[in-house]
Image (tube, rainbow, N blue to C red):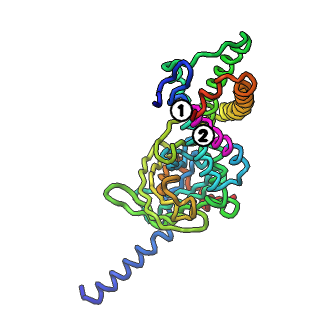
Amino acid sequence: MGQWLRRVLIVWLSVVVWMLPAHAVAPLYRVMKSQSALSFIGLQQGDKFTGVFKDFDATIHYAATDLPGSSLDVVIHLPSLDTRSLERDQALISAEWFDVGRFPDARFRTVAIRQTTSGPVGDADLTIKGRTKRIAFPFVWKPTAGGATLDARVNLNRLDFGLGAGEWADAGIIGHSVEVVVHLVLTAVPPVAVPAAQPTRR
Amino acid sequence: MMRLRSSIDRWGLVARILHWGMFLLFGVTVFIGFYMVDLPRGFAKYQVYSRHKSLGITLLVLAVMRWLWRLIDTAPGRPVMPRWQSIMSSAMVAALYVVMLVIPLSGWLYNSAAGFPLQWFGYIHWPALLDANPSIKVIARQVHEAAVYIFMGLLLVHIAAACKHHWVDRDDIMRRMLPFR
């Protein structure tokens, strides 16, 4: 095979591989909300506290054999947060923290999912309070009868998203690192239901 | 010579320090308590609340120490007084001792039920009494407030009685608790 022919072949193959994800889409899953939880663990004055976002919408395409066609897209409705403390919840939705009046939703969207030795890792854009940060999102995907479960733990720095800046930036009062714990119970959606693939925003 | 323990005619150094120290600390803490509730939500309010809670924990520890010391120490004798005065005096002391515990305890309970952490001046972690609980939170707050009003009422009677002993009866009831002779 000549040098020229080989180059053409490589370019052609690259183009084909590059175009594949645009067409192939991995199977769609729907979240069983009653069994799933999107929670976070923060540190307040040395004490851990746990909060949950009760309301979120997720569009999940996933196949271990088709990572280019897989994607996770989650819209989190921030006013639904609950940290088991009325005072803390009121503070968290205020302008100094999530500022839900201006930014009612947060969004998590993978731009790519890659396979690593320890499992799949999503490279995702996380947008909170109008600020987008690219984060690595390692997760565990376990197929179940009729669906799957997705579990992940990822640490975020609240200051990256302007949460509690200024006076609240003191880590001794509210820790900078917040652990987000994701547990999604998913049911596979038959291919005929694919038109619902767009994330539903309310 | 400064005596730690009380004698027959004078409160000892420990009793006097606890008495006046807690008087000053209660004054500051209650003042902050009334001031802080109307502050606009934000960092300043959070900080003021934290200080109030830390002072409250300090008062709780002091109140427990005072109870223990009262059990160990021997209180000075009472001068001769009518029986009803003697009973009232004992009842007043008992009420003050109870309320000085109830105020910080109910505050601690309120904070726990509200699901808030507690750290003594940012240094020592103070455990919660129970998990977040909205109904106990409401009750604890009411007890906390009511106890403060009761305390202030008792304090007024206590001070009035001390003044009466000093200027009307001209006995040494007040003098033996004064910080200095």
Which of the labelled discs sits on residue B25, or is there none? Answer: 2
Q: Quadrant of residue A64?
A: bottom left
Considering every residue shown, the one lying at the far left of the view is: A1
**Residue ID for mark 1:** B62
Q: Position of residue A37 (x, y in %)?
A: 55, 46
Q: Is residue A11 left or right of residue A50?
A: left
Q: Position of residue B42 (x, y in %)?
A: 65, 55
Q: Nearer the viewer, residue A200 or A40?
A: A40
* Stretch in magenta: B17-32
Q: Is residue B29 magenta?
A: yes
Q: Amino acid at mark 2?
A: Leu
Q: Is residue A98 magenta?
A: no
Which of the labelled discs sits on residue B47, or is there none? Answer: none
**Residue lying at 33% horizontally and 81% vertically, measured from the top left:** A10
Q: Is residue A77 visible?
A: no
Q: Residues within 10 Å of mark 2 (few under 14, many from 20)?
A: some
**Residue lying at 46% horizontally and 74% vertically, measured from the top left:** A19
Chain of the residue under the numbered disc 2 shown in the image: B
Q: Quadrant of residue A1?
A: bottom left
Q: Is residue B89 left or right of residue B72?
A: right
Element type at marker 2?
Answer: helix
The tag earlier along the polypeptide, 2 or 1, is: 2
**Residue lying at 65% horizontally and 46% vertically, measured from the top left:** A87
